[in-house]
Amino acid sequence: MIGAVLDNPASAKDPPVIADVSFVDEIVAARGAGPDALIPILQAIQDRCHWLPDPALRRVCEVTAITPAQLDSVAGFYAGFRRTPAGEHIVRVCHGTACHVKGSTLVEDALRLYLGIAAGTDSDSQLRFTIQRVACLGCCTLAPVIQIDSITYGHRAADTAPDAVRDFLELQLANPDDHPVPAAAIPDPDAPVIRIGLGSCCVAGGAMRVHDELTREVSRLGGNARVEEVGCVGMCHQTPLVEVAGTGPLSGSSLYTRVSPDSAGSIVRRHVRPRGWWRRIGNAWRDAIDAIIPDDGPALPTRRYAPDACDGEICEFLGPQMRIATEHCGQLDPLDLDAYLAHGGFAAVAAARAMDPAAIIEALSASGLRGRGGAGFPTGQKWSKVAAAPGEAKYVIVNGDEGDPGAFMDRMILESYPYRVIEGVLIAARAVGASEGIFYIRHEYPLAVARIEQALDRCRGRGLLEGVSIRIVQGAGAFVCGEETALIASIEGQRGMPVLRPPYPSEAGLWGKPTLINNVETYAQIPWIVRHGPAAFARIGTGRSRGTKVFALTGKVQRGGLIEVPMGVTFRQIAEQIGGGVAPGRRLKAIQIGGPSGGCVPAELADTPIDYESLAGIGAIMGSGGLVVLDDTDCMVDIARYFLSFTQAESCGKCAPCRLGTRAMLDILQRLCEGKARPDDLRSLESLAGDVKCSSLCGLGQTAPNPVLTTLRYFRDEYQAHLEGRCPAGRCAALIRYEVVDGCIGCTKCAQVCPVGAIESRPYQIHEIDVTRCTRCDICRRECPTSAIVVR
């Protein structure tokens, strides 16, 4: 099948003709005909067609009150909308921070070569595949990541990226009826419970296939166990994870890490007693065969991973953590409402409904909770402003537009703790007097959207929302919509462009009404504070930074994942104790915090506490919670260029300092990385950074220079080297070359794997690399068995 894609050089396929647009009427009937329905309508059309055909857009204007000018303005603003035909399958290549530092550019280049996608285009000639760059897929611990349609593949490299395409095509040809997953039987009350994490990272790591094998084996043994889906387990570096709790040969609770589908059956047989003597005899035979012919099955499990009952790296990873927003991590099915209620779910809502609204806000203020979206504004103060604003119509919005590359905290919370966030929204609505809530979630987070939708349906069915109407609005691919006023404009069906404040949303927000906006993590903290009291929360953390913070720990670290730690832990504790440090032989260089708005903290400042005040003192900000560890193979000039290219592309263009200033800064960084720098570039770069920071309209432009300023401050020697035409880290392609040195044994492996034929195969002779054809993909160096290929 793939050969047909690659080997058929036929002329480009004609763009598809859209003759029947009756589906547009169905979409409008389901989503509405007002201006605020424009973005959902466009999303539905694109989901169906993979692009926005002109006939369908004309039909939208015919059957709604939306004008062609409004439609064209919105469709042209959001990066998520496509106006040209796309292939049958969309290959999304993540270029988030973690993916970038691990080689996502090389992965994309390899995919383009394999799929025959020419430079300057994004689709192959037959419109089978379209490559789409995305800022972040939210599976940062599996970097580099690609997604083909709805299937995500992690840990890709230039030489393994084509394998994902082949696997995807094989799945398209497979018949799911060949290996059906049996219906679950009713187990004995005291039967073991087998839990498997099925968050996005887990699924991308193969957990769904493990889940299916567990279910099949349980069914084969008579169904005497229960397989439960749980949310994010935090330890993304160990996925797929399986925990067995209950009775059996190994009583208590046991955790298995990095489980493969082939080893899932042996886990079940180790813990589950078959029903019926025929099954027991068959199971004994299989165990005997397993003992004679060892497989790659799991070793003895790690015991239950409570910090006081574990050892080894799992204990190191979990020991410093404290669960508030991620309470009951890895223990509950995200959509099991009864399980959530049994663990105290919605008790905080009941308590809040018995309280005076002012008392709720007073308790929140006493807790010291600050908004976890980045700026750290006191939450109680924001709530009190909305509560005091006149008017009966008020709104509560959940900002789930987590656009920071390298961050996936909100995604995992939405996927794993949907009822907890809903509970926080209900408490907020009670406190500020709102009767309508809105979840604004990235369109790139389909599992989060699905779980919130299902959770809301189940809450409605039980009468738990009690008069508060809550709905979901999906973003359309604009990072700037993380800013409050831009987010509001997007919900109203407009271009997501910030407006000058005041008035603030607390006074005049959605549709001009008082509006409360907090991010996902902030709402997830609220139920714990109500149940345990503000003093309990205030005792955690430091000074003016109270409670815990959820971080996405990724990059050049050995143990990545979703972590929640008390405010005040140091960068070193997170990178070295929780994360296990960088790879052997490498050196910790810096930790990037806060995404495009944050900064790069050098290794010599790794003992800095992570709280709002300490970070401000070193020129960084908390941001939403991305932590990307960098080692000595990372170029800090390239990192600054990467972040500025992101913010420049995401600038809405409304104000000149951001629109033009970030472009001028990016041009300088581009010259530095290409060996074309000018003597006064560093001075110009610093001057521009200051101007953009002071003059931009919104937070995107005001914080865009932070990665540049912190790298200039702490890594100026690297900038100086680039002025001289050198990249000390060996990262900038234009400033390096690959060379074969003594030690080459002429094995020809480098020639065999070179995707562009830059190495001629000469058996038993020292090879040479044609630097004019070399793409610096790094495959040859990694494949060389004698380390005879070096970067100069």
Image (tube, rainbow, N blue to C red):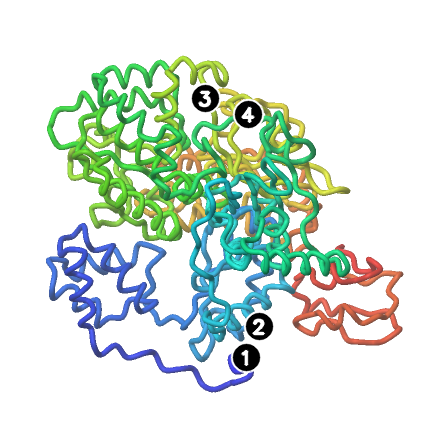
Residue 111 image-quadrant placement: bottom right
- Mark 4 lies on residue: 618
The first of marks 2 and 3 along the sequence is: 2
Q: Which residue is mark 1?
A: 6
Residue 491, how many percent across, how many down? 24, 45
**Disc nearer the start of the sequence (2/1):** 1
Say which amino acid is labelled 4: Ile
Give the structural element (helix, strand or loop) at label 4: loop
Report, in whole angstroms, how far the alpha carbon at label 2 lies from the one at label 3: 49 Å
Q: CA distance from mark 4 to mark 2?
A: 45 Å
**First-in-chain label (4 vs 2):** 2
Left/right placement of residue 45 relative to residue 766 reads left
Mark 1 and mark 3 lie on one chain; the one further toward the N terminus is 1
Q: Residues within 10 Å of mark 3 (few under 14, many from 20)?
A: many
Mark 4 and mark 3 lie on one chain; the one further toward the N terminus is: 3
**CB atoms of marks 2 and 1 within 8 Å:** yes
Nearer to us of marks 1 and 3 is: 3
Residue at 12%, 24% (x, y): give it: 390
| Residue 364, horizontal then vertical, whole percent | 33, 19
- Residue 715 in sight in this render: no
Give the residue number, with chain letter if any, for mark 3.
Answer: 547
Residue 550 position, x and y percent, is 48, 32
Query: Which numbered disc flags the more N-terminal residue, 1 or 4?
Result: 1
- Is residue 35 found left or right of 739 in the rendered image? left
